[in-house]
Amino acid sequence: MALPCLQSLLRFSTAPLRLRVHDDGTLTAGDRERLAAALDEPEVVPRREADERLAAVLAARPATRALRATNPLALKLVDVPLLAAADEVAYCDSDVLFLRPFTGLFDLPPPAGALFMCDPQNAYSVRSWHLLREPRLRLAAHVNTGIVALRTGCYDLDLVEWFLSRPSYRFAPVWVEQTCWALLGQAAGCRLLDRDAVGIPVPGREPSERQVALHFVSPVRGLLAGFKPPKGQAGEGPPPPAPTALRSFAAPRLTAPALAATELRRRLRRLRHRARPSAGE
């Protein structure tokens, strides 16, 4: 999955990019050889090296340390910003496929400190009533962390530890990392990429001519294997069009009623799914 997706990032970016890959501890020697050959010798941060470099930083932060030890997504939340070699982080998941040339993917207009993809729902690990009870729990709405741009000076590790030390904020473990980023983003000043250009694929729907990238998140990951980009966009046929300038907008702050509406929609979807007759009925 990573090879075609990251190849498309390198190919279609008008700005030259060089990749840094964070190993979660599962890369084999053969995996590294394939990455090197396909992705122009990316830098690889070995898991053991990252563990050693972050040991002192996380010594007094047990909740952050525990999440990093058990959830691979915590490497995105912790390792990527703390081990960054520059003042700005530019991060892309390995399941984001780019379809056409683009510019401005990681642009952070002042005074914004963070930028993300725009999620169609509020996929967070907190409940609506948590927002009412805890004034410090201020989240940007609709954050999707398939793409992240961040000014490293806006990264607040103490805020991360505060959030992760509260078990009640983890009802959906797969969304803990994304929720924490929404917390950091709201504090930093957050922007979201135009969802019509950078979004999540919809089963049965062809991407529009405006679509620059698709994030194949877990529920739709199976679509990637059979996905065929629009004609003329995959290195065959006519030359690709002029680069698309990607735009972003200020992220609204998430309110308790907005999160409650998301919760209600999810519950209704589950009920409809359960009500469907099974095969043979």
Image (cartoon, rainbow, N blue to C red):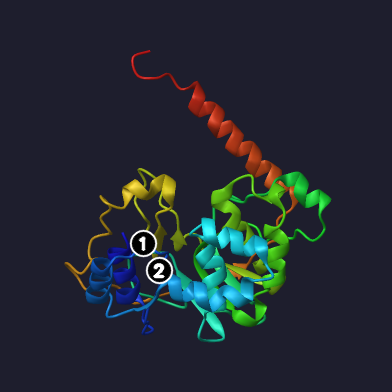
Q: How crowded is mark 1: few (under 14 residues within 10 Å), some or many (20 or more)?
A: few
The residues bearing labels 2 and 1 have C-alpha atoms spaced at a distance of: 7 Å
The reply to whether residue 118 is visible in this rendering is no
Name the spot of residue 246 as percent of width and height, x first. 47, 72
Name the spot of residue 9 as percent of width and height, x first. 35, 72
Q: Is 269 displayed left or right of 92 in the figure?
A: right
Q: Which mark is residue 42?
A: none
Which quadrant of the figure contains the N terminus? bottom left
> Disc 2, disc 1: CB below 8 Å?
yes
Q: What element carries label 1?
A: loop
Q: Which residue is drawn at 54% across and 55% down?
A: 119
Name the spot of residue 42 as percent of width and height, x first. 33, 79
Q: How crowded is mark 2: few (under 14 residues within 10 Å), some or many (20 or more)?
A: some
Q: Is 84 displayed left or right of 232 in the figure?
A: right
Farthest residue, direction left:
237
Q: Is residue 272 above or below residue 17?
A: above
Q: Camera-side residue: 52 or 41?
A: 52
Q: In this view, does 272 lie above or below 194?
A: above
Q: What element carries label 2?
A: loop
Image quadrant in which you'd find residue 219? top left
Amino acid carrying label 2: it is Asp
Which quadrant of the figure contains the C terminus? top left
According to the picture, the residue beneath numbered tag 2 turns out to be 23
Q: Is 5 displayed left or right of 255 in the figure?
A: left
The reply to whether residue 198 is visible in this rendering is yes
Amino acid carrying label 1: it is Thr
According to the picture, the residue beneath numbered tag 1 turns out to be 26
Name the spot of residue 184 as percent of width and height, x first. 66, 68
Q: Is residue 16 above or below residue 271?
A: below
